[in-house]
Amino acid sequence: MPVKSIHIAQAIREDLSDAYLRREVCPGLKTKDGRTPTVAELRAAFAEARANGYEVLPPCDNVDERGMCKGHPVEDEPPAAMRPTDEEPAPAPERPGLPAVWDLVLADMAGRLSPPPCFEVEPQKVYIVILRLAQGLAASLGSDIAADMRERDITGRARYGTPLQPFNGRRALVDAYQELLDAVVYLRQHMYEAKHSAPEGIDA
């Protein structure tokens, strides 16, 4: 089977505020000339894509009726249109005087946050707790959690060519555990930044 690359598409999110688009969405996109789009440019792109009947911003010239990339031979990939970058921007270089967030988490684990020896995981209860936590975070960020879920589904379908389904050959608890580890360290980073001022010369 020929190897193809598939461009990731950005869901149309006209419901989000300008501040959220500027902070969370625009930095992950590039225009045809390689720039980060302005909010006005992004909203214009949303409107144009919606007028063409698309569900997402078409990431290239080879899209289906929803606007999602149909794939390209790896040796013949066209220039990207406005589409998500392949990776999120890399973190800033290491700064002297700032802790490594994983070290903070491990210190917490060694102290008062250690679970009791008989702690058992019931996936059904954990699922409800995490879903409620996600709803709370969405509310605090002013985001529509249902729309965010749909956007992640669209991104996953574009990246892997299939929706996430049961019996897909992967261990779901292992995937959930790895994602939880990421959530833990990101939340610990937020906790540190909320309690401390950024060092001089570093943007908060």
Image (cartoon, grey):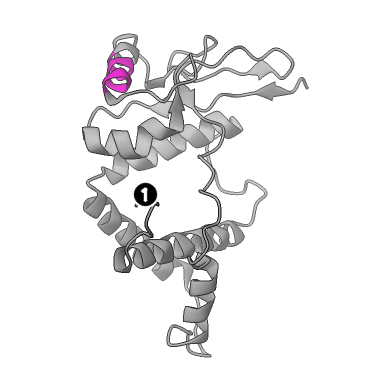
Q: Position of residue 201 (x, y in %)?
A: 39, 51
Find disc 1 in the rendering and name its residue.
203
Closer to the camera, 174 or 106?
A: 106
Q: Position of residue 68 (x, y in %)?
A: 48, 20
Closer to the camera, 84 or 62?
A: 84
Q: Residue at x 35, y 62 (%)?
A: 193
- Res 127 visible: no
Residue found at the far front of this picture: 200
Q: Position of residue 163 (x, y in %)?
A: 52, 36
- Residue stretch in magenta: 40-47
Q: Is residue 116 above or below residue 8?
A: below
Residue found at the far bottom of this picture: 117
Q: Residue 103 lies in magenta, yes or no?
A: no
- Res 91 visible: yes
Helix, strand or loop for disc 1: loop
Q: Is residue 105 above or below residue 138?
A: below
Closer to the camera, 112 or 62?
A: 112
Q: Is residue 87 left or right of residue 141?
A: right
**Can you say which quadrant of the picture contains the N terminus?**
top right
Q: Residue at x 53, y 29 (%)?
A: 158
Give the overall secondary structure of the magenta segment. helix
Q: Residue at x 44, y 59 (%)?
A: 186
Q: Residue 45 lies in magenta, yes or no?
A: yes
Specify the amino acid type for callout 1: Asp
Q: Position of residue 82 (x, y in %)?
A: 45, 19
